[in-house]
Image: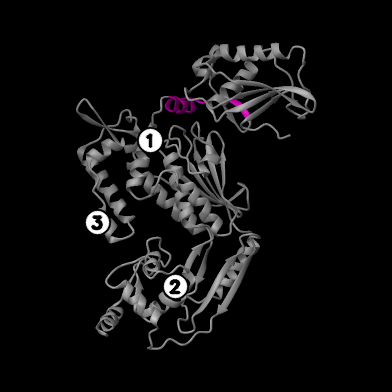
Amino acid sequence: MSGENLNIEYKREVPEKSIKYVKSVVAFANGSGGRIVFGIDDETREVVGMDNETIFKTVDAITTAIADSCEPAIMPNVALKTIEDKTVIIVEVEAQRNRPYYVKSLGLEKGVFVRVSGTTRPADSYIIRELMFEGANRSFDQTVCVGLEVTEDEIEALCRKLSTVAKEHCRSEEEQRRVKDVTKNNLVSWGVLVEKDGKLLPTNAFTLLTGNAALPTKVQCAVFKGNTRTVFVDRREFEGPVYEQLEEAYKYVLAKINLGARIDGLYREDAFEIPEQAIRETLVNAIVHRSYLQPSHIQVIVFDDRVEITSPGGLPPGLTVERMKQGYSIVRNEALANVFLYMRLFEHFGSGIPRVVEMVKSYGLREPEYIDMEVGVRVNFYRLPEEIRQEIRQAAAQVTTQVNMADNQSVDILIDKDTTQATTQATTQVTTQVTTQVTTQVETLIIGIGDGFYQRDELMQQLNLGNIRYFSKSYLVPAIQQGYVTMLYPDKPRHPKQKYYLTEKGKELLKLLKSQP
């Protein structure tokens, strides 16, 4: 039988003083719910059971004590269960929404309890405030920052900066042209500014987006030797606007993990041992969904075996780790989420975590670990064992920075997804030397592209082809090798919005093909 944790507590018998278990009931209601099991020893996990002659009176007493002792009222589900031929009482408390819940006799200031590391503890003042915001269904970042005023120049400066950042994150010139500049009205609608009595007041989101000292926040980054926080190798702290903290923390992690090479047929790509986008999206989540009421900061730690990202604030009520993995999302800071969405720092609410999991698994790595610690959320990205990373480094060292186009030579660094064993495979495909002769397939592709810009799937659909390998080998790769077709993003062959178009040489051939009878 498993031990006590965030969501379960064992008691050998019902205490004489009900407050001893009512505190845990309150803590479960303020958290993600939980169960108290009476009739199981909390130390040995021995099933001792309850007295069957008085068990129904005991159930009534527990139910009454909880109903009379908690504010707002909590109505648990109380059930009997037989384990090892003995009857135990299970009190199940669901996560409640009218937070904060507290013990009446202790009052709001001292009667609020939460679960931390499998134990019930009094809530600190900042946690009580967080629970109040959750209970009122309000976002802290959309609340006016008390004592802070803002000028028209400061508002205009923020508008310009947000517009600039949004354009910097566009993937094409066409997308940049579609970006609309941020206006004062946008800031109001997002909750960055609040209009009151004809005056614009800055919210906490404005403070976070400008790096104002009225709401100090930072991202703490470090590298530790080994797999524990014993010997640190390097440490940095990043302050300023939260979107700048994101960029600095992102660059820090990439500088501390391994960079290798992935070569797929024609293309050679630099690739980090953990998907870059997975790290970036997790940092975005940490900044947008953290609790800014807590005095602690986001921590990003690089260990030998993992990269650990921890953000203050547990999961909101109704949200669990499993539901997150399924794409369910509850936004804690709505103003920041709106601004980050505008700046192209993430694309859709709720889709990030499922995408991160898939990206990491596609690298042959262990699935990232998500941990709800009630007062924080931690994500662990596990790295490959050192001996496997060494094999990869040795293989990558043998890869030249140029791919021999004439021999169509390719070198792949592979990770077996089932066994997590790294191997290296060097293959040389014997092909006919590229000549001036153009195959029918290349001619068909050139005619299909014409004056347009197309993604690979669009070209395959246009040519009525369904096999990606055949299309790449017989159409696309030869056309690129011979200089007739090029890429919109030549430095990033696997860009998600990659498109292909004709070079000047390709356009000349297109004219020739069109002129033929």
Question: Camera-side residue: 314 or 91?
Answer: 91
**First to last magenta residue range:** 119-135
- Taking the spot 53% from the left edge, 13% from the top edge, the residue there is 104
Left or right, 324 with respect to 386, comes to left
- The amino acid pointed to by label 2 is Phe
Q: Which residue in the protein does label 2 denote?
A: 471
Q: Of helix, strand and loop, which mostly describes the magenta segment?
A: helix
Q: Which residue in the protein does label 1 denote?
A: 215
Label 2: state its secondary structure. Answer: helix
Question: Camera-side residue: 65 or 151?
Answer: 65
Colour mapping used in the image: one colour
Q: Position of residue 287 (x, y in %)?
A: 43, 43
Residue 497 magenta? no
Which is more foreground, mark 2 or mark 1? 2
- Taking the spot 32% from the left edge, 33% from the top edge, the residue there is 203
How far separated are the C-alphas under marks 3 and 2? Answer: 33 Å
Q: Can residue 148 be seen in this view?
A: yes
The correct choice, above or below, for 11 with respect to 363 in the image is: above
How far separated are the C-alphas under marks 1 and 3? Answer: 34 Å
Q: Can residue 237 be seen in this view?
A: no
Which is more foreground, mark 3 or mark 2? 2
**Cβ atoms at labels 2 and 1 below 8 Å apart:** no
**Cβ atoms at labels 3 and 2 below 8 Å apart:** no
Dot placed on the residue nearer the N-terminal end, 2 or 1 = 1
Question: Residue 177 got which mark?
Answer: 3
Question: Camera-side residue: 516 or 117?
Answer: 516
Label 1: state its secondary structure. Answer: loop
- Taking the spot 55% from the left edge, 73% from the top edge, the residue there is 397
Dot placed on the residue nearer the N-terminal end, 1 or 3 = 3
Question: Residue 311 got which mark?
Answer: none
